[in-house]
Amino acid sequence: MRIDVLSIFPSYFDGLTLSLLGRARNSGILELNVRDLRDWTHDRHRTVDDTPYGGGAGMVMKPEPWGEALDEVAASTMSSGTARPTIIFPSPAGEVFTQATARDLSTRDHLVFGCGRYEGIDERVFEYAASLGEVRLISLGDYVLNGGEVATMAMIEAIGRLIPGVVGNPESLVEESHEDGLLEYPSYTKPSTWRDRSVPDVLLSGNHAAIAAWRREQQLERTRRRRPDLLPDEDAL
Ligand code: 6GU
């Protein structure tokens, strides 16, 4: 997979060279290019924002640098013969990002993340981007961040680990919170008693059917208590 990130704070993404995704980048599974949006400005001050038409607080990102940047990264997909890119704009006004979104996006050949700052990006940029690829506005949840960078990093980590070969043991992907629509069961390791707290007996029993049943019950119990919104309807499972 190829991922291009457009941002006025490219150094935010230095952390993606670490650990799992760093290894995927080195092994060639993942090509990640982080580009400074200001490289597509042409004035002395490398201006990317301006005041909003109609008035109001804050500044809006100008369309011209975005247009040139998107032309360049989308065109380089087309010349390499692959499909049109999926262009993602992180936005608190977008659809909510879930594990299903991550799964869907992990199958794409080319993702472009456009990180907005200030009060947002000129609306015509989204319309224009739709002529270059599939545009998705995606939110992490119902709270406000200062810009798209942190949201993009979260999405790249969630998507990247689903690309075959990025996570060493694929089984570790299926027994996780949200993969089967429920929260994860609790985990324990040695010692079997620690500070007067014992590991549940069933886990020491060697009875694999009983362990599987206990884990399932724990998943349901936790999900009912912490995240009832995830359950389809009362006791459907
Ligand atoms: Cl994707 N962007 C911003 N700026 N704020 C957010 C968000 C995204 N998701 C939740 N809050």
Image (cartoon, helix red, strand yellow):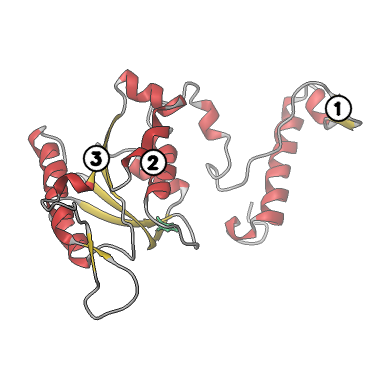
Question: Which residue carries the number 2 mark?
Answer: 12
Furthest residue to the left? 79
Residue 7 showing in the rendered view: yes
Question: Which residue carries the number 3 mark?
Answer: 35
Question: Which residue carries the number 1 mark?
Answer: 194
Classify 10 Å Cα crowding around label 2: few (below 14), some (14-19), many (20 and above): some
Residue drawn at 75 percent across, 37 percent down:
214
Mark 3 and mark 1: span between their CA atoms?
Answer: 49 Å
Discs 3, 2 touching: Cβ within 8 Å: no
Residue drawn at 31 percent across, 41 percent down:
10
Task: Give the mark nearest the N terminus, 3 or 2.
Answer: 2
Residue drawn at 86 percent across, 27 percent down:
194
The percent coordinates of residue 8 (x first, y second) are 29, 48
Mark 3 and mark 2: span between their CA atoms?
Answer: 11 Å
Furthest residue to the front? 44
Task: Give the mark nearest the N terminus, 3 or 1.
Answer: 3
Furthest residue to the top? 27
The percent coordinates of residue 141 (x first, y second) are 48, 58
Instruction: Please state if 192 lies on the left or on the right of 185 as rendered.
Output: right
Q: Quadrant of residue 75?
A: top left
Q: Quadrant of residue 80?
A: top left
Q: Nearer the viewer, residue 186 or 180?
A: 186
Tell me, for residue 134, which label it has, or none.
Answer: none
